[in-house]
Image (cartoon, rainbow, N blue to C red):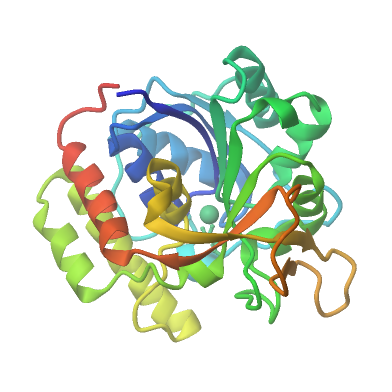
Amino acid sequence: MSTKKIIIDCDPGYDDAVALLLAAGDPSIEVLAITTVAGNQTIGKVTRNALRIAKLTGMDNVTVAMGASRPLLRGEVVVAANIHGESGLDGTTLPEAEFRVDPRPAAQVIVDTVMREPEKTVTLVPIGPLTNIALAARLEPKIVERVKEIVLMGGGCHIGNIRPMAEFNIENDPEAAHIVFEEKWPITMVGLDLTYQALATAEVKARAAQIGTPVGQFLSDVLEQFSKTYKRSKGFDEPPVHDPCAVAYVIDPTVMRTRKAAIHVEYRGEYTSGMTVVDLRKAAPPECHTQVALELDRDRFWTLVLEATERLAQQYKK
Ligand code: BDR
Ligand code: CA
């Protein structure tokens, strides 16, 4: 089977952890690098979490590179300790891992990897604030033409989760998001419209709990913790597991319905900073390079996640 090569840019985080499990356990995916960005927690914490998840899932030989510790222009990153806890993964158990990261910053690793691989073979999967991706595009503009596509978790058509109109990943660095959306690479925006359909229901959690392996236990703990914190801080009965949706699209684009639409990021508005402005008024022009995900095949999505986790009973051997 020909594999799909991806770089995951992440801030683990419960749902980022599920995205990493899905990528590690799906046979169609080859993870070229895991890059980290401050978001759900500070850069040191999310990088440590990424290294430990890599160890759990047998991805210890995958390059892990540490990226931006703060947004391009704004002061500090606004972490989501209310959801993900002080460690970023509170209440879960992971193997300890040495803090061994690539000496290059994340943006450089993204550039080097995209320039090294054949043209149009590497997909970028950002599931945190877009700071590293914006920096990479400025560091080496040739990557814009060279990547296959960007499939990102962030934004939404008309809803926000951190502000009325703004989603967490975009709001944490709207200037970076603006840079990324204005470059002409193909972008699929997997935003809240879609991820609010990826709910970890009681049935999903029961299936995770039955897997009965260390990775299955980790997934089960993640979903249970995420359920508790989403209920407590946002009132959701079942939590939306955002980030693996982006990986699922790379594995199988038919897992969701998408629509081509122009997307721009508002970064100046007093009340709308961080909003992704999606033009759904009419058919997008042919040159439009962005699309938005709208409808999820929930069963197929959860089957992908659970089967990938089951495969990780064995070591990651790709
Ligand atoms: C996004 O924000 C983060 O808290 C999650 O990991 C996800 O990437 C959802 O708005
Ligand atoms: Ca994330």
Residue 111's place in the image compared with 53, above or below, is above
- Quadrant of the drawing holding the N terminus: top left
* Rendered location of residue 140, percent (x, y): 79, 24
Residue furthest bottom in the image: 235
- Dividing the image into four quarters, tell me where ligand 1 lies: bottom right
Residue 17's place in the image compared with 200, above or below, is above
For the question of whether residue 113 can be seen, the reply is yes
For the question of whether residue 89 can be seen, the reply is no
Q: Pick whichever, 95 or 300, lies toward us.
A: 300
Q: Residue at x 79, y 42 (%)?
A: 183
Q: Pick whichever, 147 or 69, lies toward us.
A: 147
Left/right of residue 130 with respect to residue 55 in the rendered view: right
Left/right of residue 57 with respect to residue 73 in the rendered view: left
* Rendered location of residue 51, percent (x, y): 43, 34
Q: Residue at x 22, y 66 (%)?
A: 204
Q: Pick whichever, 26 or 164, lies toward us.
A: 26
Residue 144's place in the image compared with 297, above or below, is above
Left/right of residue 193 with respect to residue 274 in the rendered view: left
Q: Pick whichever, 209 or 124, lies toward us.
A: 124
Mark count: 0
* Rendered location of residue 6, percent (x, y): 49, 32
Residue 265 appears in which quarter of the rendering?
A: bottom right
Residue 138 appears in which quarter of the rendering?
A: top right
* Rendered location of residue 159, percent (x, y): 63, 78
Residue 21 appears in which quarter of the rendering?
A: top left
Q: Residue at x 66, y 17 (%)?
A: 115
- Quadrant of the drawing holding the C terminus: top left
Residue 152's place in the image compared with 157, above or below, is above
Left/right of residue 191 with respect to residue 309 in the rendered view: right
Q: Residue at x 53, y 71 (%)?
A: 193
